[in-house]
Image (cartoon, rainbow, N blue to C red):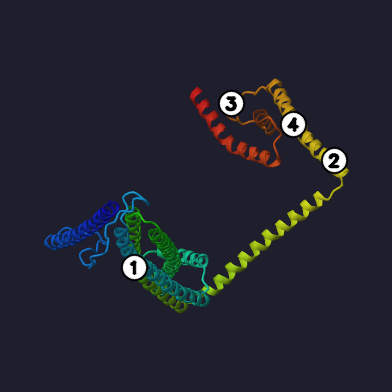
Amino acid sequence: MIRLHVSLAVFLLVSCECMVQAMDEFSGSSDMASSTESSSVAKETPDKKAPEWDEAATLVIPHDDKTGITTDFFDNHTNWYHKKQILTAARKKYIDVTELQEAISQKKEEFAHVRTGINDQLNAFYKEFNIEEASIAKVLAKVSEALKEKEKTGSALDPQEQKQVEEFTQRKTALEDLQQALASVKELDTNFDKALAILFEQEELARAYEKGAGEQYDEIEKILSDQKAEVLFLHIKSAGENLAAIKQYVDDDFASFISKTKSELDKAIATVKKSMETLKEQGILLEDEIKEAQENEKKAQEEIAAKAAAQAALQKRLAERPWWQKSLDWFKQKFGIVQVYTVSVWQKAKTVVVEKLTLKKAPTKIQPKQESKPIEPQGSSSAAKSVESVTGSTQSAEVTKAIEMSKTSIQPVALAKSTEVKTDKK
């Protein structure tokens, strides 16, 4: 009886194992059929784009490969096979990111080498033409003033003066071109520095994108969640797109700007050389003006330095005084302030008193002028007395002589009148 029960148990175990194997074979065939159907559907609908990590249509999966196993004991909604596909795609994207970053760094080195060549060119230029804009402006002001003086005369210029006007005009044009060219050289030099600063910022940004993509790729390798891996993959993809945009900017817009600026700089330097030759032909030597300006600047700096040294020495002496001298100087300073204030108040009070006394003083009477009467023909003494009564002062010898002459000239008229009166009475 016991043997019968044991036999039945063994028979049941064997039957269960056979059923499990049959079910496993059936599930494997169904998985193969579903994968075949999905590949055929993907081929029939090419418009629907699959994710970049989805390579199920091209993979050959063995029958015993347990694809799609959900590892719920590690993380919810996790598919390790899906995550493996994302990791493969992320590796390709990260390689593209590193290549783009290296290309941008190489471009930065190339443009930095171009900048070094421009610096050498500018150093040679400034060494050959040690010119300052202040000196050019000074000479230009002199030429412009001389030209205005010549133009004031207008059409009244002789041939020689007309020739001088033409020479001054040529000098003025050459100086203006030189001034503008020098300003252009300085501006273009500054533009180069600004452009390279922008390029260095973009290169640093590219390094940051590459570093972030590397950290995200390392995180994809560590985690099991396919959903988290997908988010990290999208970050790596975005970094690659940003790096591609930076590289396109460096290759197109930035390179075009550098080339254009370099060409304009060469033209400005050529204009400076041509203007200098024209000025030398006109007899203008800017070296003398430059030397004079440098000497004046040196003198001004020496004066400023001397004043600063004297002020520092004075401060040092004041700081080294003993305490009693400092106290005495303090009292002197305060007493001086009080003294100045007292003197100013006294002067104001004195002025007010003088003004009041002036107003109180009685005004002098003005004598009315006496009307002058015609001088009658009298003796010399009576004529002198009448004149003295009119003028109110003793006359000089010249005035007395003039009165006597007037008396002799008036007498005939008076005699004539007297004769006329006598005839009328008869």
Residue 388 drawn above or below residue 159: above
The residues bearing labels 4 and 1 have C-alpha atoms spaced at a distance of: 92 Å
| Most foreground residue, 409 or 35 | 35
Local SS, label 3 = loop
Query: Upstream in the sequence, badge 3 or badge 2?
Result: 2
Q: Amino acid at mark 2?
A: Ser
Q: Secondary structure at mark 2?
A: helix
Q: Residues within 10 Å of mark 3 (few under 14, many from 20)?
A: few
* Residue 295: numbered disc: none
Q: CA distance from mark 3 to mark 4?
A: 48 Å
Q: Which mark is residue 327?
A: 2
Tell which tag, 3 or 1, sits nearer the viewer: 1
Question: Upstream in the sequence, badge 2 or badge 4?
Answer: 2
Q: Nearer the viewer, mark 4 or mark 1?
A: 1
* Distance from Cα at disc 1 to Cα at disc 2: 80 Å
Q: Nearer the viewer, residue 286 or 198?
A: 198
Q: Which residue is mark 4?
A: 347
Q: Amino acid at mark 1?
A: Asp
Residue at left offset 79%, top offset 35%: 339
Q: CA distance from mark 3 to mark 1?
A: 123 Å
Which residue is label 3 attached to?
371
Dot 4: element? helix
**Which quadrant of the view contains residue 28?**
bottom left
For the residue carrying disc 1, how many other residues have a C-alpha within 10 Å: few (<14), some (14-19), or many (20+)? some
Whether pointer 3 and pointer 1 mark residues with C-beta atoms closer than 8 Å, the reply is: no
Q: Is 221 situated above or below 127?
A: above
| Left or right placement of residue 222 versus residue 8 in this view | right
Residue type at mark 4: give it: Gln
Q: Nearer the viewer, mark 1 or mark 2?
A: 1
Q: Which residue is mark 1?
A: 96
- How far is disc 2 from disc 4 in space, using C-alphas? 30 Å
